[in-house]
Image (cartoon, rainbow, N blue to C red):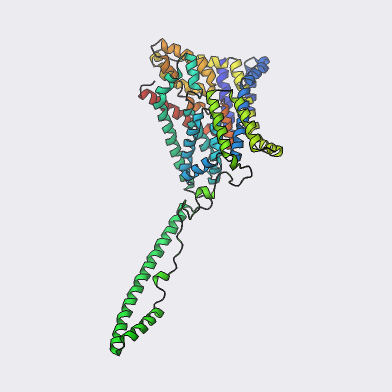
Amino acid sequence: MLTFLGFAMIATFLVLIMMKKMSPIAALVLIPALFCVFAGKGAHLGDYVIEGVGKLAPTAAMLMFAIVYFGLMIDVGLFDPIVRGILRFCKADPMRVVVGTAVLAAIVSLDGDGSTTFMITVSAMYPLYKRLGLSLVVMTGVAATANGVMNTLPWGGPTARAATALKLDAADIFVPMIPALAVGLLFVFALAYVLGLRERRRLGVLALPGQKAPREVAEAEEVERTEQTERTERTEQTEQTEQTASVEGDLVAAAAGSAAHSGSAGSAALGATTGPTPAATSLPTPTAAPGSAAGAAPEDGFQGLDPDRATLRPRLYWFNAGLTVALLAAMIMELLPIPVLFLLGAALALTVNFPHMPDQKARLAAHADNVLNVAGMVFAAAVFTGVLTGTGMVKHMADWLVGAIPEGMGPHMALVTGLLSLPLTYFMSNDGFYFGVLPVLAEAGAAHGVSPLEIARASLVGQALHMSSPLVPAVYVLVGMARVEFGDHTRFTVKWAALTSLVVLAAGMLFGII
C-alpha cells in the first residue's frame, strides 16, 4: 500500500507542476499532506514536517547566504570579465552561446556545489539569453545536465556517500570512472551544440547593439566589391584617355614646330578635361567586420551586465576575488560548515563593499526576491521529503524495486544498479539512495560475485538526471534565477539528462569499468 501511495504521490506532483495546475511550493506542501492522510498517518504529519525542516534547515541557510554573497559579487563586478570573455567567444551566435553555457557550467562545477554553479552560470548567461531571445529552458537544461555529470567529483557528494555506505575508498570509485564521465561530458557538449544549432535555425545568427548582423556585413562587403570594381574601371579609362591625349598633343606640337609650348598647353588642357586623378578620388569608408577595432565588438556594445552600474567596486576587485577563492577553498577543505562559511562571507563582503547602512539595506532588498523564493521552495520540499521518509514510503518503494529484479540478473547487478540509479536518485535524495538502497544492491551483487566497487561506480551514473530532481534544493536556485517555470524545466530537461546518464553507463560498460 505504501509503495503504491509513494509512486502515486510522486506522479501526482510531477503531473500537476508540469501541467502548471499548481505552483511548485503549493504542490510540495499540499500533495504530501494529502497522501499522508491517505496513508492513515495524518496525526503524525506535524512530526514528519518538523523532522524534514530540521534536516533541510542548514541547506536553506546555506542557499540564502550563498545567494546574497554571489549576488553581491555580481553587483560589484567580480564576474564581469567572465561575461566579456563569454561574449567574445559567443559573438551573438546562438550555437556558441549554448555551448558556452555548457562549458561555463562544467568549469564552475569544479567547486562541487550545484547552487554556486547555477548562480554563477545564470548570472553570466541570463542577460545574453534575454537580449538575443534564446530559450531559457535550454540554458537551465544544459547547465543542470553538465553540473550533474560533474557532481560525481569526490567532493561533490555522491562519490563520498557511496564510499561511506560501502566502506570503500572514494579514489578507487572515482578515478576509474573518469573515462566514462569524460564521455558523458563530451555528450553534454555535443547536446549543447545540437540545441544551439536548433536555436540558430530558429533565430539566425544575431547581432548585439552596435554590431552589424552577418547579413548586413555580407551586403556591405558586396557593395564594397562593386565600388572597387567601378573605381578600377574608371582608373583604367582615365589612364587610356591620358595616353591618347598625350600622343595627339605630340603630333600637334611637331606640326606647329613648338613641341615644348604645345606640350605644356596640351598637358594643361588635358588636366582640365580629364577630371580628378585616381589619387584624388574619395574612397568610401569600408564597413568594419564584427569584432574589429572600427566596429563595435560584442564586449564593447553589450556587456550583459551594466558596465556603468553604481554598485561596481573596481578598486576592490582583487579583494573580492581573493575572498571568493578563499571561501571556495575553505568549503572544499571543510574548514567550517558551508552555511557558516557563506554567512561569514556574505557579512564580510557586504561590510567592505558597502560600508554605509542605506547601501547595505538596498543590496539586501535587491536580492530578497531570490532569497525568499529559494528558501520557501526548500522548506516546502522539506514537507515532501519528510512525508516520504516518515511514512516509510521511500523504504517500501526501494524494497519493491530491488525485489522486482529477476533472479537471472544477479550476475549483472552493476548494470541493474546503473539503471536503477536513474529513477531512484530522481525520486529520492542522495542520502536515501546511497545509504538506504545501495547497500542492499551491493549485497545482492556480492552474492553473484559482483564487486562492490563496480556497484559503487554504477551508482554514480544517474547524477545527470538527479540534478533536476524536485528534491534537489539547487535546482530551485537555477529555475528561480533564470525565471523559468519548474514544470517547463522538468519537461525539457528530463529526457536529455536521462540520455546523458545512459551514455555514461554505456561508456562504463564499454571500457570495462562497470
| The quarter of the displayed image where residue 415 is located | top left
Q: Is residue 279 visible?
A: yes
The x and y percentages for residue 71 are 61, 36
Return the residue nearer the eye: 447 or 303. 303
Residue 343 lies in what quarter of the image? Answer: top right
Relative image position of residue 325 (x, y in whole percent): 54, 32
Residue lying furthest top in this view? 447
Image quadrant occupied by the C terminus: top left
- At 35% across and 24% down in the image, what residue appears? 511
Vertical placement of 51 versus 61: above or below?
A: above
Residue at the limit of the structure toward the bottom, as seen here: 256
Q: Is residue 36 above or below residue 304?
A: above
On the rendered structure, is 510 left or right of 340?
Answer: left
Answer above or below: position of 72 versus 380.
Answer: below
Please name whichever residue, 420 or 302, is drawn nearer the observer in this view of the structure.
302
Image-quadrant location for residue 44: top right
Q: Position of residue 509 (x, y in %)?
A: 37, 23
Residue drawn where x is 52% and y is 42% of the image: 81
Residue under the image location 51 percent in, 14 percent down: 399
Q: Position of residue 407 (x, y in %)?
A: 41, 12
Going by the image, does 393 lie left or right of 280? Answer: right
- Quadrant location of the N terminus? top right
